[in-house]
Image: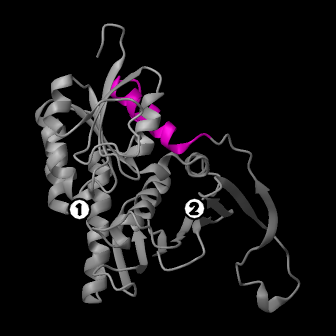
Amino acid sequence: MTATGTLRAGLVGLGSMGRHHARVLAGLDGVEFVGVVDPMGDKNGWAQGAPVLATVEELLALGVDYTVVACPTALHEEVGLKLAEAGVCALIEKPVADTVEGARRLVEAFESRDLVAGVGHIERCNPALRSLRARLEAGELGDVFQVVTRRQGPFPHRIADVGVVKDLATHDIDLTGWVTGQTYTSIAARTVSKSGRPHEDMVSAVGQLSDGTMVNHLVNWLSPLKERFTSVTGERGCFIADTLTADLTFYSNAAVATEWEALRAFRGVAEGDMVRYAIPKREPLLVEHELFRDAVLGKSDDICTLRQGLRTVEVAAAVLESAATGDTVRLNGSAKG
């Protein structure tokens, strides 16, 4: 940190996400963007004028308080461990690592040194989901019965090393646990591979959370329809979040008396009022960076921790295991971290 209290921040990776991190870091209040590591250089001019370096060691030599890790997932562990050993805090893009074991090693490296570290699960910063989570915490829905997510669209050409589970389903796994405050206890899944690549292109999963809530995830990159849908159904109605538009809508239950004796025993619901909330719509990536900056400064702990990121990788691994074996996989209900 500089004498004026400004944090010195670095970035590893100038790819499809790294370029956006560079843009936000360059304009972030209270932060000096000091350098970028990318062995490929900056042929697109995305570094915002920051020096472009070939190695993490060169970045560390400049002196940084924290670094954003946006290189390919397979390199997260190697880069993260170097940062932890140097005493540097880190915001690591999701998923935190490509294996459960790698994620555990990162958790241990940063926690043992008492360093602030987070995972870039960007949906936590989506205005619709932040509003939804606050409303669930306030008890506006009553008991929660089910969470359903759909995330589909065309194949993203930035992806080379993982399938749809690790790349996209990790968003839905994390946001489901985060908005409900629960952990996964079981998951069953099926996958489809249709694009000619070695990894899965589509997954359908059914799971259960620690309070008994049922979850359903449908994720694919085989559809021309782009959809980012989250619904939470409970005793008072249903919330629908569209994270593409950051809209949140509530459909309330209405009590309707019936004179028909045969139907009186059925405790169903009737259609009630619909409310679409007016929500301030700030850029999620900017919100994510502000929250992480504040966490490094000790002003906030509203980030996705590495331990929570590990949990998401564990659930994703269970999804792939279930799809491979045809069995329902049980997960221990460990603390949310």
Is 90 on the left or on the right of 184, as rendered?
A: left
Which numbered disc, 2 or 1, marks the residue that appears first in the sequence? 1
Vertical position of residue 156 compared to residue 97: above or below: below
Question: What is the spatial separation of the Cα atoms under label 2 and label 1, in whole angstroms?
Answer: 35 Å
Report the quarter where the N terminus lies. top left
Residue 309 location (% of width, % of height): 31, 53
**Mark 2 Cα-neighbour bin, 10 Å: few <14, some 14–19, many ≥20:** some
Q: Residue at point 27% right, 81% down?
A: 198
Q: Is residue 116 magenta?
A: no
Q: Is residue 210 visible?
A: no
Vertical position of residue 258 compared to residue 76: above or below: below
Residue situated furthest front in the rendering: 43
Q: Residue at point 69% right, 44% down?
A: 279
Q: Is residue 99 visible?
A: yes
Q: Residue at point 32% right, 81% down?
A: 197
Q: Residue at point 71% right, 58% down?
A: 249
Is 42 on the left or on the right of 256, as rendered?
A: left
Residue situated furthest top in the rendering: 3
Count of residue discs? 2
Tell me, for residue 58, which label it has, or none. Answer: none
The residue that mark 1 highlights is 98
Query: Which numbered mark, 2 or 1, is in the foreground of this view?
Result: 1
Residue 308 location (% of width, % of height): 32, 51
In magenta, the rendered stretch is 282-302
Q: Quadrant of residue 269?
A: bottom right
Residue situated furthest right in the rendering: 259
What amino acid is found at the position of numbered circle 2 in the picture?
Asp
The residue that mark 2 highlights is 143
What amino acid is found at the position of numbered circle 1 in the picture?
Asp
